[in-house]
């Protein structure tokens, strides 16, 4: 019998202040491990999910890892191939760190590597997005693409899977703060206004353009000025306890920018060295501890690798 393989798909930060649904990057630390091996019965079966406390379905048609893997198998004409999958959640879900995206990426990447399809990661992106779509009904690659491809990704067109990796200036570190409060993605999206005033639209476009320029030129001064979300953050900040206190602290400590990851509740600070990132994480822990709230923190460089075989 052919030996199974294990893959890892990392968590990710999406929206990145000024790139709602079109900008994201992968981080080190949290993510999903997926083991794929030959099965005993026809078709793909999820036999075990670890680390999810029974909250995720084993049904392949309801699980993001299963949906993405099935989409690939159908494309290959291998829907009946006997395969067994074990999912190990090594990250919180409902955190705004791309948990469903990591599962979707891990599922399709594991199957592709196990079957030696020869498909590139970019080839796998449409199938991974099918898995993510099953989680919240929307088509957006700002978590899936970074988790799969690694690095900082900007998306020109989510529907056409037109994505581009941006260069990463040396020295960037990310401080991630995850308070243990529940924010559902669908609810977080539902509160957003459908229209944006023209003046904010123009300013936000300028910030996004300046952000891209700063990444190409390693201009930290310009990066700091551009990391200002005028549209989405003000509508969601009230969902996260002590958001503005944390943002004020992070900027005071020297962060280049601070905002909400995805739908929240996780937040992130982009910093130009590890000392600032670590201090922000330390102070966030202290603030939430005083409020008797639990939070996890991660300090990470941007993950250039994306999904990997372990």
Image (cartoon, helix red, strand yellow):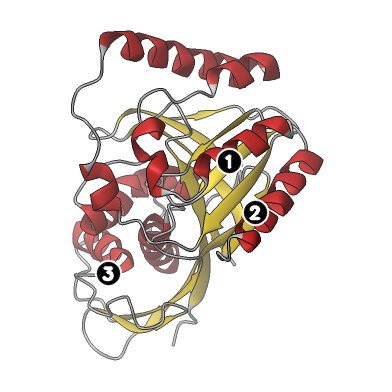
Tell me, yes or no, whether the two marked residues, 1 and 2, touch with CB atoms within 8 Å.
yes
Query: In the rendering, at what x and y percent does residue 282 appear?
Result: 73, 53
Left or right of 107 on screen, residue 268: right
Query: In the rendering, at what x and y percent does residue 113 appear?
Result: 45, 63
Q: Secondary structure at mark 3?
A: loop
Q: Secondary structure at mark 2?
A: helix
Mark whose residue sits in front, 1 or 3: 1
Residue ID for mark 3: 63
Query: In the rendering, at what x and y percent does residue 144 appear?
Result: 39, 48
> Which residue sits furthest front?
291
Looking at the image, tell me whether mark 1 or mark 2 is earlier in sequence order.
1
| Quadrant that contains the C terminus | bottom right
Mark whose residue sits in front, 3 or 2: 2
Residue ID for mark 2: 287
Give residue 110's quadrant in the image.
bottom left
Q: Residues within 10 Å of mark 3 (few under 14, many from 20)?
A: many
Give residue 301's quadrant in the image.
top right
Residue ID for mark 1: 245
Tell me, yes or no, whether the two marked residues, 3 and 2, touch with CB atoms within 8 Å.
no
């Amino acid at each position: 019998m052919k030996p199974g393989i294990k893959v890892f798909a990392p968590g990710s930060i999406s929206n990145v202040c000024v790139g709602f649904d079109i900008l994201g990057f992968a981080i080190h630390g949290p993510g999903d491990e997926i083991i794929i091996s030959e099965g005993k019965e026809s078709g793909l079966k999820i036999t075990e999910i670890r680390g999810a406390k029974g909250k995720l379905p084993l049904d392949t048609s309801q699980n993001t890892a299963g949906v993405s893997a099935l989409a690939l198998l159908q494309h290959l004409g291998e829907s009946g191939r006997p395969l067994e999958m074990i999912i190990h959640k090594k990250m919180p879900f409902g955190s705004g760190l791309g948990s469903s995206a990591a599962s979707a990426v891990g599922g399709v990447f594991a199957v592709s590597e196990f079957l030696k399809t020869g498909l590139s990661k970019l080839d796998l992106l449409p199938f991974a997005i099918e898995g993510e779509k099953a989680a919240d009904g929307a088509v957006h690659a700002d978590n899936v693409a970074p988790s799969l491809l690694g690095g900082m990704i900007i998306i020109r067109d989510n529907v056409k899977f037109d994505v581009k990796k941006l260069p990463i200036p040396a020295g960037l570190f990310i401080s991630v703060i995850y308070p243990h409060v529940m924010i559902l993605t669908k609810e977080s999206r539902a509160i957003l206004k459908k229209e944006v005033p023209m003046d904010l639209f123009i300013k936000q476009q300028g910030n996004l353009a300046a952000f891209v320029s700063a990444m190409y030129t390693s201009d930290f001064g310009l990066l700091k000025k551009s990391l200002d979300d005028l549209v989405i953050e003000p509508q969601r900040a009230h969902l996260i306890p002590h958001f503005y206190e944390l943002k004020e602290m992070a900027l005071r400590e020297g962060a280049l920018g601070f905002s909400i990851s995805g739908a929240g509740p996780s937040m992130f600070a982009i910093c130009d060295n590890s000392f600032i990132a670590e201090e922000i994480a330390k102070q966030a822990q202290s603030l939430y501890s005083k409020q008797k709230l639990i939070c996890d923190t991660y300090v990470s460089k941007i993950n250039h690798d994306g999904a990997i075989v372990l």
